[in-house]
Image (cartoon, rainbow, N blue to C red):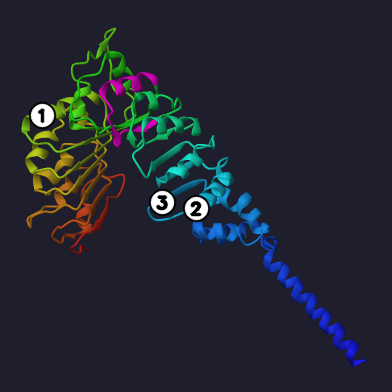
Amino acid sequence: MDNKIDKERMYKITSKCEELCENVINPLILNNDCWLLICELLSCQDVLNLSKVSQSYKNLVQYLVLPSKFTTWEMSFSYHNISLDDFKFILSCIYKTVRELHILFLPERHFGLLTSYQFLNVTKMRITLSRPMNETDISKLSNVFPNLREFSPHGICSSKAIELFTNLEHLTLTCCRKFTKSDLGRILLTLNLKSLNLDIFKKVSHLSREEFLKFSKIEVLTLNRIELGLISGVNLYYDHNSVIFSGLKVLIITGNLIEATEVDKLFENIQLIVRRDVSSIEIANVSEDFLNTYLNPEKYDFLNQVNVLKFINITILNNVIGMPSKYKDLRELYFFYCHAPMNLDILSIITNSQKLDVISFEECDIPPIVISKAFINSLGIRKNAIILNWCCKEKVSVK
């Protein structure tokens, strides 16, 4: 009798152990949300290793984890070494769902495998190889990513390859080699760009009228100071209507300014481009003379409607900090990594503008100040309170 009971107990224990073992190797014991949360904590290689545990786990990774985890995939082969088989597995899992790809230093065989797929949903991509790309490589990518909207080619290329990306809207050419001004003209005429990052030419001539008409429709534009010459000499009038950058939202100008005449030319060109309201200006690493000479709304109309001013690494003097009196519509003023003398009159900036809403000092070397609430309340009629952000090397006390 006792033997029979022992056998029944042993059978139950054995059955329970088998059930537990089955549950351990069966990923369906957890729901999809749990697995996604778990795999968010795992590296790419850990997820690949998980797929090799069993067929059940492979299905989990292939049909759930990777398509969900890699809607945006960023990978650098200088830090991670993924085998060709693992790379093929990842591509087979995500090529229909991934939307953004950033893959750096891709090995040659991996690049060949990549070009055997077509990623219809990818709109933003940046790929570099273990060697410089050539025009043939970039041309191949136009078939791999037929719906690409944003592209930063890296290597030797001309307009012939870039024109193949017919849906392109955002283009960065900074890392292109042997790219000519003629190539730029052909791209402007072929593509409908919304943003363009040049900062590539050391010498330019002005665009043709047809090229300039397309150029003037760009919304976000990055040029070096020499590339401003692309618009010099262009006839800006057509049927008695001036051609302006009516859609321009952001203009970034890079490069060092050496001579005063160079700065004069720079601001003349900016005035030519932005004959309309400018909402935000950012100035970095300039002298007091520069600020006094060129940030002058009476001389440059495009400064009149500025709402946001940002200064980086400048000396804040009393005649500079009083700028709100010049900018009647200034709402926000920011200083980053700036410095000031001991006699800085910070309260003048508050007094000089009834519309200023935000004043911000971040990582600035500025003497400590005391701001009285009674003083702020006596400034006059203000619809909004002034917000003071102070994150400096010295502490500020507010009474």
Q: How many labels does the image show?
A: 3
Image marks 2 and 1: residues in contact by CB distance under 8 Å? no
- The residue drawn where x is 26% and y is 8% is 240
Question: Which residue is more in the foreground, 105 or 291?
Answer: 105
- The residue drawn where x is 14% and y is 35% is 295
State the residue position of label 3. Answer: 77
The residues tagged by marks 1 and 3 sit, at their Cα atoms, a distance apart of: 46 Å
Element at badge 3?
Answer: loop
Which numbered disc covers residue 264?
Answer: 1
Is 396 displayed left or right of 163 in the figure?
left
Label whose residue precedes the other's in the sequence (3 or 2): 3
* Tag nearer the camera, 1 or 3: 3
State the residue position of label 2. Answer: 83
Element at badge 1?
Answer: helix
Q: Residue 278: percent from the left, percent from the top?
A: 26, 32
Q: Residue 129: percent from the left, percent from the top?
A: 38, 42
Q: Please, what is the three-letter code of the amino acid marked with disc 3?
A: Phe
